[in-house]
Amino acid sequence: MKEFVKEYYGKILQGSGDLKTNACCTTDASPSSPLKQQMANIHPEVASRYYGCGLVAPQRLEGMRILDLGSGSGRDCYLLAQMVGESGFVLGVDMTDEQLEVANRHLEWHRERFVFAQSNLRFVKGYIEQLDQLGLEDNSFDIIVSNCVINLSPDKEAVLREAYRLLKPGGELYFSDVYSDRRVPEALINDPVLYGECLSGALYWNDFHSLANKVGFIDPRLVEDRPLEIGNDEIHEKIGHIGFYSATYRLFKLQGLESHCEDYGQAVIYNGGIPHSEQVFTLDKHHQIEKGRMFPVCGNTYRMLNESRFAPYFTFYGDRSTHYGIYADCGTSIPFDSTPSSVTTTGSGGCC
């Protein structure tokens, strides 16, 4: 399957329009988006060979060291390179020669476009399940991103485990991918077209949470999600009974997080100052924190803010001396907001 994926994204797909479904297809940033200008600075050939399902640009990136898993033609890397600035660095890893050739072809073009004295970006060939073979040091990246690629990996646990190893304490894995509302049957997983279209390799969302916890990423936070419409009658006939979602998660590398949202009477105030989030800081879909307003948080949320690059922008209140129990809304049902019409199961989840 790995060899098929290399062929699919290297030879069969020559552009975003060659995809057979809508799974790996992100709507461009809206005209009001702060990313619109950065998008306009990306070479047309790089943009035309983009296969992503989300925008992987978290807040506060200036000066950060970022690793992109499955960087493809480099669109996200070139987007992030602008945001980290000349003091930051972006490394893209991909296994497909044809994609890497496109990405590397335009390094100098983008350096000039960004008006940088030297490029702050590099692309290397490698497998995202075997990052240990690339000579990357432990605790060496502030942020790791990935865009609709981990679902294509045959060993997702290895990907998450390596990401945890490479992140600095307090760093985060921020990535978009395709998830399912149930486990995909083995016969469908082995269908190469379904796999290449980012459907049959998708993790059941609850299995993803378990896997993340297993490697050390406790309490994954869902940032945003949307149901996917397959958009292909033949493929829908095969796999349309399963609900699929594009979802963006952020996972923090913090020792000792708890499995649920526990209440210690803690709170934070956002003081502003984060670019493009001056009035409201969004940690995840359940935590939109208004500037200047006292905001109660669970113990995990407190630590995610207090022990990460976001700490200087907050005032923190309370400690862990008194435990008041679990937050009432800390559930275990499907976390996504809505389901495609073909799916009958419903539910909502989340914490705090």
Image (cartoon, rainbow, N blue to C red):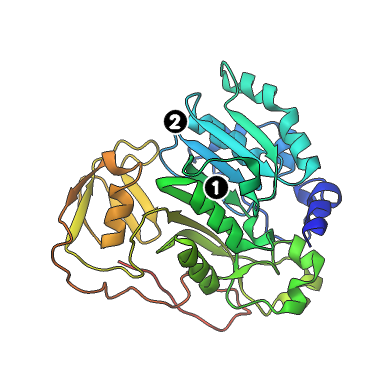
The residue at the point 57 percent across, 27 percent down is 120
Does residue 306 appear in the picture of this structure? yes
* Looking at the image, residue 115 lies above or below residue 55: above
Does residue 71 appear in the picture of this structure? no
* Front in this rendered view, residue 141 or 332: 141
Residue 320 left/right relative to 24: left
The residue at the point 49 percent across, 68 percent down is 209
* Looking at the image, residue 117 lies above or below residue 318: above
The residue at the point 55 percent across, 32 percent down is 81
Residue 325 left/right relative to 47: left
Q: What's the residue type where badge 1 is placed?
A: Val
Coordinates of residue 176 in the picture (x, y in percent): 56, 55
Outermost residue on the top side: it is 117
Residue underneath mark 2: 63
Secondary structure at numbered mark 2: loop
Coordinates of residue 159 in the picture (x, y in percent): 59, 56
Q: What's the residue type where badge 2 is placed?
A: Gly
* Front in this rendered view, residue 247 or 119: 119
Secondary structure at numbered mark 1: strand
Residue underneath mark 1: 145
User: Looking at the image, how many numbered discs can be counted on the residues?
Assistant: 2
State which quadrant residue 260 falls in. Answer: bottom left
State which quadrant residue 205 falls in. Answer: bottom right
Q: Earlier in the sequence, mark 1 or mark 2?
A: 2
Coordinates of residue 196 in the picture (x, y in percent): 76, 60
